[in-house]
Image: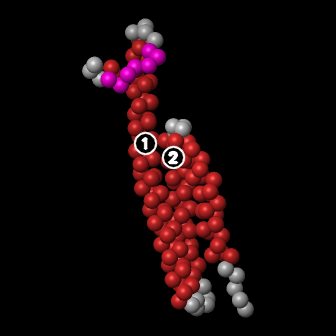
Amino acid sequence: MPTSHSHEVISPLVCLCFESLHLPLHIYSYITSRLHPIAALVLSIICAGLWFQAAVMVVIIDVGAEQVYPPVWTTLTIMRSTLAAIISVLYFVYLGFAAGAVHRWRKEKQERVRLRVKGNEEGQVLTAMPSSASNGST
């Protein structure tokens, strides 16, 4: 009885469908300087997880199959899993950069709030302060 290999297609297909929507929006947001650090962090977590599960599930499904596949099929499985693993590693690296950007964004936000509170205590209204003025240098 022939077995269906639909499970072999669904996992990478889900990743590719998400990427086909995610990448153009992500690139457009980055180019137009509208990419928020938290959005980058959340999307990198989602993409890393999707590609990681695709890499792992392909191997688990083929190893757990109750039939012997030809060597060509095994080679394709290894290549597919390796490609998905490489993409997931790249997304994990991007996740690290996004986490660093969120950290910097939160520090800058705290500094803006501190300056706003300091300005209110002095009776001044601060609309914008250059970064060089905040540390006392000119």
> What label does residue 40 carry, if any?
2
- Residue 54 found in image quarter: bottom right
| Residue drawn at 33 percent across, 20 percent down | 133
Instruction: Examine the rendered structure and indicate whether residue 118 appears above or below residue 22.
Output: above
The residue sitting at 59% across, 57% down in the picture is: 19
Mark sitting on residue 101: 1
Q: Position of residue 116 (x, y in %)?
A: 44, 19
* Rendered location of residue 100, percent (x, y): 40, 44
* Residue 119 percent across, percent down from the top left: 41, 14
* Position of the N terminus by quadrant: bottom right
The stretch in magenta equals 126-132
Q: Which element type, helix, strand or loop, lies under badge 2?
A: helix
Q: Amino acid at mark 2?
A: Ala
Mark 2 in CB contact with mark 1 (< 8 angstroms): yes
Q: Is residue 63 in sight in this rendering?
A: no
Question: Mark on residue 18?
Answer: none
- Toward the viewer: 31 or 14? 31
Assign the C terminus to one quadrant of the image. Answer: top left
Residue 28 position within the rendered picture, expressed as x and y whole percent measured from the top left: 57, 44
- Characterize the magenta stretch by its predominant secondary structure: loop
57 or 71: nearer the viewer: 71
User: The residue tagged with tag 1: helix, strand or loop?
Assistant: helix
> Is 67 situated left or right of 36 in this image?
right
Q: Is residue 19 above or below residue 3?
A: above
Q: Residues within 10 Å of mark 2 (few under 14, many from 20)?
A: many
The local crowd at label 1, few if under 14, some if 14 to 19, many if 20 or more residues have their Cα within 10 Å, is some
Residue drawn at (48%, 62%) of the image: 88
Query: Which comes sooner in the sequence, label 2 or label 1?
Result: 2
Which residue is at a point 41% across and 51% down the rendered structure image? Answer: 96
Identify residue type, mark 1. Answer: Ala
Relative to 85, 5 lies left or right:
right
In the rendered image, the residue lying farthest to the left is 137
